Image (cartoon, rainbow, N blue to C red):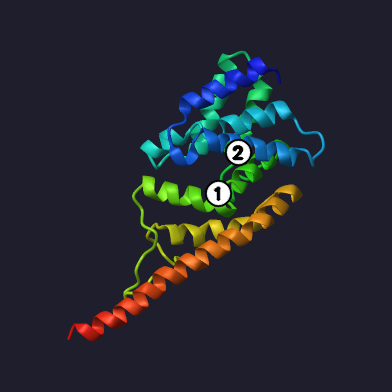
Amino acid sequence: MNRETYFLLENFMLSCMEDTAHDKEHIYRVLYNGLEIAKTEKNVNYDVLIAACLLHDIGRKEQFENPALCHATVGSEKAYKFLLEHGFDMRYAEHVKQCIQTHRYRKNNQPQSLEAKILFDADKLDVSGAIGIARSLLYKGIVSEPLYSVLPNGLVSTGENDDTPSFFQEYKYKLENLYSKFYTKKAAAMGKERQHIAVEFYNRLYEEVNSSYEDGINELNKIIK
């Protein structure tokens, strides 16, 4: 890929990014993660990989405005149309489209090509470890969702069986389980290095808020008769 092509794709990406939890820096981290993973794989099509990494979240705005939409589906179609309009080969555009289409967690639409698997792993690495915690908290703030839910007994829920969205629910539903989902050995190793930080943060945060509720409820009951 030459610089002119790279800048064409990059500028299109930049024109689409408005979500601060999925901003241009997220895109660059995914790209750099993808290139790091690709070094350990054979026969990687870098033209496809770079384009897919750059364009994988260009459908986020549409999903944010209408949560019924899937940003991976919307983004893949936008990327495909953009590539064809700018003279790229149809097979190339289709390959990039398929990578973007399968970068989300969905059992019925898993990545098939090597480039799609690298994109999937690179994107998931950016929700692992400390950066994953930070981005999740940032996003919860954007959509006005709480850190945790409170159980009927007045104590803090771990998030494990919650239906109500919160950071703890997100951690238990998604962040805690992603470390076994990687397709490539390199991404699995990178994720494992980050995992303990996320576990420690969640456990510490739960301990702090839950003990506050436990102690506070007991003290309040002593005072209020």
Q: Secondary structure at mark 2?
A: helix
Relative vertical location of residue 87 with respect to residue 173 in this rendering, above or below: above
Structural crowding at the residue carrying mark 2, measured as other residues with C-alpha within 10 Å and reported as few (<14), some (14–19) or many (≥20) = some
Q: CA distance from mark 1 to mark 2?
A: 10 Å
Between residue 113 and residue 1, name the one nearer to us. 1
Q: To which residue does mark 2 refer? A: 29
Please, which residue is most extreme toward the top here? 87
> Does 62 sit left or right of 34 as displayed?
left
What amino acid type should be assigned to the residue bearing mark 1? Ile
Residue lying at 30% horizontally and 82% vertically, measured from the top left? 218
Between residue 42 and residue 67, name the one nearer to us. 42
The quarter of the picture where the N terminus appears is top right
What amino acid type should be assigned to the residue bearing mark 2? Arg
Q: Position of residue 190 (x, y in %)?
A: 69, 51
Q: Position of residue 126 (x, y in %)?
A: 58, 46
Q: Is residue 153 visible?
A: no
Q: Are marks 1 and 2 in contact (CB under 8 Å)?
A: yes
Q: To which residue does mark 1 refer? A: 131
Residue lying at 43% horizontally and 37% vertically, measured from the top left? 19
Please, which residue is most extreme toward the left here? 225
How many numbered marks have been drawn onto this rendered protein structure? 2
Residue lying at 49% horizontally and 47% vertically, measured from the top left? 135
Relative vertical location of residue 69 with respect to residue 167 in this rendering, above or below: above
Between residue 164 and residue 35, name the one nearer to us. 35
Q: Is residue 204 visible?
A: yes
